[in-house]
Image (cartoon, grey):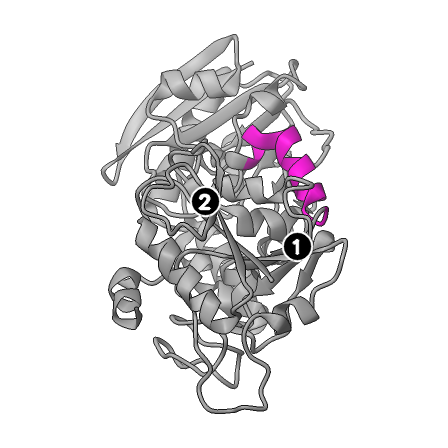
Amino acid sequence: MDCGEVQRLWVKGLGYVSDKHVYKFKDFSECVFDTQIQSKDWLCHELKKVAPDNFDHVSILAGWYGIVLIPFLYQTFGEINVDLYDVDEYTTDIAAHMFNDYPKVNIHTKDVVFDDIDYKGQVIINTSCEHMMDMNIITEKFPDKLFVLQSNDNDNVKWLHINCAKDTDELIKQSGLKNILYRGGKTIYHHKRMMVIGT
Amino acid sequence: MQAVSLKVGTTYSARYVNQLYKQLKHADKRIQYTCLTDDAEGLKDEINVIPITDDFHDRKWWNKTKLFKPGLFKEPTVYLDLDCYVHQKFVDEEKPWGLEPFFDCSVKDKLNILKTYWFSEDTAKKIHQCDVNSSIMVIDESNGEPMWRDFVDNQEMLYKSFYGLDPWLYRRHSNNLNFFKPGLAYSYKHGCVFPDDTRANTFRQIPICVLDDVNDRGEILDGLW
């Protein structure tokens, strides 16, 4: 996957962080770590094989800045509609600035677990399942959508990784997905990362 | 005056409870002290014990939600984490001391709680994503009810969405909180009030020291005791 657009967005975002949200610098610097690149590349590679033919709209839950995933989705699927949700208002402010020249990308400040959200599109992605409640609370509300879920077994990240999965079986159990189109795992920087795709 | 703390598991021994009681008694001889615990062995006889079970083995601090049960306290009661230290009065006779100032600035119908005044707003909200610290609270007969109801109704969702109580209270109950005035308590690690007093790892002439997030707090407290 070409990272040129990721780099352009990062430079654009960095200027905004410097001007408006300097306290977010550490967080912003981590959003392009190699783990992010590898896991999103993997996601697009596998989603390409099973995505519905009419796929033109995706909802990204707890999407952080979306800085890697959105350009990779565009490279893989073209200029689809994107709704990105994150609970942190400062994160979404930075993301909204970065993507202000993406007319089909909309950024929302929402809590995907506790807010009542009517998700649009054929596909729902959550690459941060280890941060939150089991995804079955959302998959059961949207039985017609294709879910792409990633989690990991790194429970050493204090404060943040509070609902890790030890393997794909546990992630599937958390997800409540019945029809699994893809399941797999990778070791990335000493920790197991897993992904399931299904309905 | 009523005070309460909570001890579950083995992270904190009975000595922590007894020491806190001793400090509180120095601050106010009339203190009536209660401990919610799953193991009362070793606690001083004067301490009123309310037995509880440890229902949160991985993150025991979620047992603190039991404090919010309506009717548990008949009158306003100050809660302190076991790694707090109540200073004896130093030199200024005119300065309010002890626990009265916490009650004086408390209100009914809201949970009275500590704010992380030692951080700037930006640091609290942009880095820690929370400006609430539940090490010290004043709880009355019913001011914990919204939190209690939320926890009873959504326990699994909350436990799997928030690492601890502080981000939960910040994110979902900011309208149900009343912050104590600045300058009544301080963080040993971070300071008292930003930007005027942010010296790290320093004791102060302020009623209560909060030692959370301090790696060697056991040794530090042992030195004070």
Mark 2: secondary structure: helix
- Label 1 is placed on what type of residue? Asn
Viewer-closest of A27 and A43: A27
Q: Chain of mark 1?
A: A
Which label was assigned to residue A45?
Answer: none
Viewer-closest of B66 and B76: B76
Q: Residue at x 46, y 58 (%)?
A: A28
Q: Residue at x 73, y 55 (%)?
A: B110
Q: What residue does disc 2 label?
A: B61
Query: How many labels, in total?
Result: 2
Q: Quadrant of the C terminus of chain B?
A: bottom left
Mark 1 Cα shell of 10 Å, populated few (<14), some (14-19), many (≥20): few
Which region of the structure is painted magenta?
B142-158
The percent coordinates of residue A162 (x first, y second) are 43, 38
Image vertical order of residue B202 relative to residue A175, above or below: below
Image vertical order of residue B38 relative to residue A165, above or below: below
Q: CA distance from mark 2 to mark 1?
A: 42 Å
Q: What residue does disc 1 label?
A: A100
Image vertical order of residue B68 relative to residue B30, above or below: above
Mark 2 Cα shell of 10 Å, populated few (<14), some (14-19), many (≥20): some
User: Does the stretch in magenta take in B166?
Assistant: no
The percent coordinates of residue B139 (x first, y second) are 64, 53
Q: Is residue A141 at least partly visible in the picture?
A: yes
Viewer-closest of B117 and B122: B117
Using the rendered view, name the quadrant where residue B182 is placed: bottom right
Q: Residue at x 42, y 36 (%)?
A: A40
The percent coordinates of residue A82 (x first, y second) are 64, 37
